[in-house]
Image (cartoon, grey):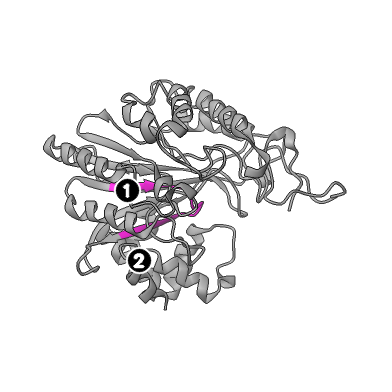
Amino acid sequence: MVDCDSACKCCCHSMPSANYTGEKATKWGSPNCNSPFVLFEQLIPQIQKQPVDFVVFLGDVPYMAFWDVDYADTISYIKFLSQQLSKLVDIPVIPVLGNHDYWPVDQFNCGSGMAEYYQTMASIYKNWIIDQDTFLKCGYYSQSIIPGLRFLIINGMLCDPTNLFSIDRPQDWVNQIAWLEGEIEKAKSNEEKVYIFGHVPIGHASDRVIPPLCYIDSSLKISKLMEKYPDTIVAMFSGHTHYDEFRVIYDTETFTKPVGMNLISPSFVPEGNRYSGFRIYDYDTDNFDITNIHQWYSDTYNVPDDEIPYWNKFFDFNVDYQRFGIEKINPAGLDKLAKMIKNDPEMFKFYYSRYEPRLDVNKVTLQREKMITCCLAVTSNDQYEDCFN
């Protein structure tokens, strides 16, 4: 544990006592602390160097010590991030709500009870969210900034088991998935491809057995949409877990045919003894298929306060995995990779070195290995339990 000075707003999960004399947090960030503001300010020029068409911010602005913030703090931090992202002149930004972007954390509702919050967020993100009608209702929206490609942004907290508002409510209790299908159908009619963005991935977590990340019934509904519209939906993109991972979505009849994929980015926050990072996806400008993944990290722990962090490309998906026969980043390719990770101990070690850098794969327990490998297939609860048991 390190002592995170509250002045820099990087806060430990366990607060040090008054007489704590251990390691102090550095200017640029330390293990198990949130990223300080100055690191995000330094990230913006790094993004500006990249040949990007748009930036997606997958949510979670306030620091992880949620007991030490209130609603006003939460909004203040989100405004800060928005101001920084506004420096990306001429680069569209797609904002997504994260479970820490409200206070109390995780507790997302819809309707009049949260109208002020959604209005505030819509005002903060007004330069980026063009059609705000559904966003004002419940935080999800549709956007198109590139001809032929539609972004569908969902509020993943509506299926999050830690959201008390979702307990004992019918699945899709705010008609978000019904809206999602309607937007996909319109995209299909308009011959558009679809990227789905949601902070919370579907299916199970890779660091616990229960509860799932997203209620299985809701995950199944989204899986069915990928099965129904495989030529329209390219992929779903998420964050939330802080791990570099993916999910393969299978057909809902035999649970054997890969029909979709959920690509999950690691975090900018070094929580859990990780690196601070960001990700760049390459895509085909003709059919919008994902063609490569580049993960960038900075080892901020070891950067002196008077120096600037250096960002290093940690891995290139094609360079790393094509030598194992994974030719494409699509459902079939990731299905093949998932089976290799599950069945080949050496491939699991290789995958884990990217899944959770800095940690020793030789210390991974058998139970944890099963959690990591079994959640790669997310379509049904029975499928997960059969794998785990």
Q: Where is residue 320 drawn, in percent x and y?
A: 40, 58
Q: Which residue occupies the extreme bottom position in the image?
A: 389
**Residue 328 appears in the figure:** no
Q: Nearer the viewer, residue 26 or 181?
A: 181
Image quadrant occupied by the C terminus: bottom left
Q: Where is residue 218 drawn, in percent x and y?
A: 33, 54
Give yes or no for residue 275 being in the magenta stretch.
no
Placement of 42 over or under 270, stated as above or below: above
Q: Where is residue 142 drawn, in percent x and y?
A: 29, 33
Give yes or no for residue 237 being in the magenta stretch.
yes
Number of numbered discs = 2
- Bounds of the magenta span? 235-248
Q: Nearer the viewer, residue 113 or 285?
A: 113
The quarter of the displayed image where residue 365 is located? bottom right
Q: Which residue is mark 2?
A: 338
Q: Where is residue 299 drawn, in percent x and y?
A: 61, 46
Disc 2 residue type (three-letter): Ala
Disc 1 residue type (three-letter): Asp
Going by the image, does 349 lie left or right of 133? Answer: right
Residue 31 shows which numbered tag?
none
